Image (spheres, rainbow, N blue to C red):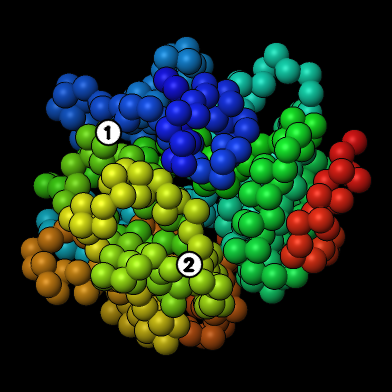
């Protein structure tokens, strides 16, 4: 299947180029020329399918003309080694599910965040695409928290790769930072004196620098890379199969890759009544949907730090999917934004009522779901629970009290490891010099 740039549909490439070069030279984003649709027989049996079976169908629909079926099955089997259950807010209640308040738990992977789905799949797809290439692959990624940890885990000690992670100084939680900075080996962390938007801008600058991508064999693991989004579409389809009737998915959103994956799933045939884009104070997309212009702005630090994005990259893909029409986008997506104070109150209130602990990002989503159901009674909402609350232990302790949230052993063991990161300013010449000076 050919892929084209959102800025120039005449710029078309194959799968290998779209994945390994990540960003078109015109600063657009790659999209498939044609969006695949799952066959009708898939929908008939979807309720009984496992997450992996759904994954093979979705990956095959996107990549099956370039990746053999047996290899797709192997990539999916090695990537999806954990589940994505749909649960009621009361942990004692399980599906089957009537219309109510549900969460899709996406934090059961190695780094306790939804980014594990995309990062693990991407690492294995890239390994397949470079199986005959002797040159080392440089994976460059910006993170606002969870992406870096997931990518570091997925690529750690993978032969023929090195990973360079840019993260904002003071912009990630303590345990998130340890996930980025303690693995060593082929993983290098760069602490940027700036925001996530600065980190993202630097990554894009690297791909737009003539000749640099080829010289360093550079690829990206951010959601600018389409192969990050396809595996995330899998859990939407798997979740919808667990409920009666099309649900509304409520998506805590920062760079909007997760929501874009849901939109791709809808084009595949996901039965969905709509989406809610839930943000914190960084509400440029909800403001656009409410009737304003799309106006990126500097990001605002919040307790839901992974959503602190003022210029979301995937908005370009969202516009492409809706033909540039805000009205068409509004037909499928509703925006919502909530403050840190509301988020803290939601964490406390849900815990007191049900005993369930929501991370700050999931709490933003739960608030948006609550408000949506108030105006759409009888609707089933599925809020994406994007990360384990222990990753934000300082916030959780402040809201619920010390010791309420238990830190899983795989995360707790990082606390006493020594951070190893190089600090750089938030300007392109500094990153370029670092990349070239550490190319070997």
- The residue nearer to you, when weighing 114 against 107, is 114
Residue 77 vs 317, above or below: the answer is above
Residue 50 vs 133, above or below: the answer is below
Residue 102 vs 75, above or below: the answer is below
Tell me the crowding category of disc 1: few under 14, some 14 to 19, or many 20 or more residues within 10 angstroms, Cα based: some
Which quadrant holds the N terminus? top left
Percent from the top left, x then y, of residue 381? 22, 60
Query: Disc 2 marks which residue?
Result: 296
Q: Is residue 92 in view from this perspective?
A: no
Percent from the top left, x then y, of residue 54? 33, 30
Residue at mark 2 to residue at mark 1: CA–CA distance: 30 Å
Which quadrant holds the C terminus? top right
Q: Residue at coordinates 37% horizontally, 40% vertically from top-left?
A: 233
Q: Residue at coordinates 54% horizontally, 77% vertically from top-left?
A: 300
Query: Disc 1 marks which residue?
Result: 268
Left or right side of 390 for 141: right
């Amino acid at each position: 299947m050919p892929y084209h740039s959102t800025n120039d549909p005449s710029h078309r490439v194959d799968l290998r180029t779209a994945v390994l070069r990540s960003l078109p030279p015109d600063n657009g984003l790659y999209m498939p020329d044609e969006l695949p649709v799952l066959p009708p027989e898939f929908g008939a049996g979807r309720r009984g399918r496992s997450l992996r079976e759904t994954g093979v169908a979705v990956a095959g629909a996107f990549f099956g003309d370039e990746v053999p079926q047996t290899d797709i099955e192997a990539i999916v089997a090695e990537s999806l080694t954990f589940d994505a259950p749909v649960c009621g807010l009361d942990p004692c209640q399980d599906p089957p599910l009537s219309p109510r308040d549900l969460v899709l738990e996406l934090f059961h992977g190695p780094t306790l965040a939804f980014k594990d789905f995309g990062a693990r799949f991407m690492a294995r797809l890239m390994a397949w695409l470079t199986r005959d290439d002797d040159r080392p692959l440089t994976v460059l990624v910006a993170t606002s928290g969870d992406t870096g940890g997931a990518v570091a885990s997925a690529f750690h000690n993978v032969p023929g790769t090195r990973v360079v992670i840019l993260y904002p100084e003071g912009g990630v939680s303590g345990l998130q930072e340890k996930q980025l900075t303690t693995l060593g080996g082929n993983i290098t962390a760069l602490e940027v004196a700036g925001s996530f938007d600065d980190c993202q801008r630097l990554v894009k600058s690297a791909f737009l620098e003539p000749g640099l991508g080829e010289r360093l064999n550079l690829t990206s693991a951010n959601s600018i890379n389409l192969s990050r989004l396809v595996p995330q579409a899998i859990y939407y389809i798997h979740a919808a199969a667990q409920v009666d009737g099309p649900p509304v998915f409520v998506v805590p959103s920062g760079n909007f890759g997760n929501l874009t994956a849901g939109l791709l799933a809808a084009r595949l045939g996901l039965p969905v009544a709509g989406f809610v884009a839930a943000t914190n104070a960084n509400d440029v997309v909800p403001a656009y949907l409410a009737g304003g212009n799309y106006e990126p702005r500097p990001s605002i630090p919040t307790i839901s730090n992974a959503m602190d994005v003022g210029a979301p990259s995937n908005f370009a893909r969202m516009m492409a999917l809706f033909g540039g029409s805000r009205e068409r986008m509004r037909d499928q997506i509703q925006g919502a934004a909530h403050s840190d104070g509301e988020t803290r109150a939601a964490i406390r209130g849900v815990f007191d009522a049900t005993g369930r602990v929501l991370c700050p990002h999931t709490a933003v989503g739960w608030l948006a779901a609550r408000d949506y159901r108030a105006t759409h009674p009888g609707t089933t909402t599925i809020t994406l629970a994007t990360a384990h609350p222990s990753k934000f232990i300082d916030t959780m302790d402040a809201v619920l009290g010390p010791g309420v949230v238990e830190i899983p052993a795989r995360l707790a063991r990082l606390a006493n490891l020594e951070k190893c990161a190089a600090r750089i300013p938030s300007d392109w010449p500094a990153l370029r010099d670092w990349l070239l000076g550490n190319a070997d």
